[in-house]
Image: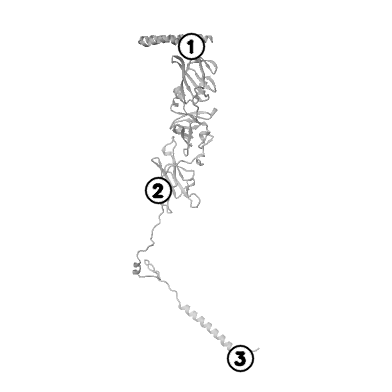
Amino acid sequence: MPLHPWILRKLNIILGSCLFAFLLLLGAMFVMRSKTTPTIPPVPPKNSTPEIPFAFKCSPEAYNAIGEPFLYLTKGIFTSKLPDLRPLLVSYGINCRPDSSKEKAQLLIGIRGQLPPASVKLEEKVYLKHDPRPGVHRWGFSENNTPTAIWIEAEVKDNQIVVRLKMKDSQGKIIKEPHELSNFALPEIPLPQNGVYAFNWQVGADKVDATLLTRQKAKWFGQDLFLQNYGGDEFTFARGRERIEFGEGASQHVIFAKEGDIFVYTNDMWQSVEAGPESHGKPLLQVKKVSEQSISFILWDPEGKHKVPLELFRTPEQPLNPNSFAIKLLGARTRQDWIAEIAGKRTLLRTDDWLLWNAGKCERLLSNQQINEYLSGQLRGELIILEGTEKINNELCLIGYRFNEYRTKFTPICIPLYKTLDSMKDSKERKQETLPNQIGLEQNGAAEDDQNSQNTSDDEDEEYEDEDDDDDFI
């Protein structure tokens, strides 16, 4: 359908107007872009501070009217300070073996609640580590003493361990402030005995712990009074020392100890030595204190890094029983040979015999082997040592000493001549006959006393002759 001419005319006018407006807009944009040039901001002078606009800026008089500010910032330099480790670091003592010099002393330093402690040499650096995680120990010793930024150095002053705490900052500068935190003495506390630390080494086949002496079957009764009185020059070392037995059977051995003595463990036994090369490199036992009921020891490992306190209590023993043995003297063959009845059996005794009484049986110690076995403790029992005769209460008696089984007690003994009822009557008649003579002798002078002594000697000879006749009859 053909369009009317007036409609085409209107369409042409509208399209022309749109085209004109578009061209006019493009021209305007070109002109504006060509006229605009970039502006360069001015460069402020070097010493000037750019002023920041402040919407609430007031006059200086208004600020002065407010007064001094309650909060303000200052420019400063941050400096690191030492942590306070005084409540954490403790001393477990100076671990110095008696056979080593003070320069080689080992100082036991620990952290409360942690084992094992560190074994430190004098002036040695001991590095610490810090763990900030919750639920774990914050401070500890560095593994294998690997260097860290914080460490301690120890020394001994007035028998106390004094440490110097040092730390490096991020720039490698050593921090020593504040002074009270960098140099302080450690409180000494006993080493816990239930920790793994104290029990990780051995003495022979026995693992070290507080029961070591018990497992070695150590027994202490007291001083060996037998050796002190009858040991001679060979056993002078036993005087004033405590006798301690170890082991049983073939492994049994004995040491004699007093305060300050040291012993080393070698060849499966404890042996007394002098501090020096002979004691180096071996477990060492030192006697620290001897009391009435116990002996305190300190045990060191061969390297001197660890020590363990030990204690040995006195073994209870039975008191001497006066009725535990029965010896009857029946007569005398000579002044040295006597006829006796022991446990219902007649035997011949000499005035210098040693009689060992054990389990109700009596044994005379005659051979050197028997005596050596008694000295070493293989033969046990109460020992009676006869030492001759003596006239007591006008009666001739065998005298001597009696030792208990463990030779820690002894008592003098007197064994009189056993008398029957008839012999007692004869003795009473002889006393009545000699009584006037004794009264007369008391009234005479010294010469008469000598004569009385001679008469008494003659009476003793007659008594021996009578007893010889009785022995011939037996």
The image shows residue 205, relative to residue 126, as above or below, that is: above
Q: In the current view of this chain or complex, which residue is farthest to the right?
A: 1
Q: Give the crowd class for mark 2: few <14, some 14-19, many >=20 residues within 10 Å.
A: many
Q: Are marks 3 and 2 in contact (CB under 8 Å)?
A: no
Q: Mark 2 points at which residue?
A: 182
Q: Nearer the viewer, mark 3 or mark 1?
A: 1
Image spot of residue 329 (x, y percent): 50, 15
Residue 42: x and y in percent read 40, 71
Query: Which of disc 2 and disc 3 is earlier in sequence?
Result: 3
- Picture colour scheme: one colour
* Image quadrant containing the C terminus: top right
Between disc 1 and disc 2, whose residue precedes? 2
Numbered circle sitting on residue 212: none
Query: CA–CA distance between discs 3 and 1?
Result: 194 Å
Which mark is on residue 425? 1
Q: Where is residue 212 in the image (x, y as percent from the top left)?
A: 51, 35
Q: Nearer the viewer, residue 201 or 190?
A: 190
Q: Which mark is residue 5?
A: 3
Amino acid type of the residue tagged 2 in the rendering: Ser
> Relative to residue 79, is residue 226 depicted above or below?
above
Above or below: residue 469 compared with residue 175? above
Q: Earlier in the sequence, mark 3 or mark 1?
A: 3
What amino acid is found at the position of numbered circle 1 in the picture?
Lys
Mark 3: secondary structure: helix
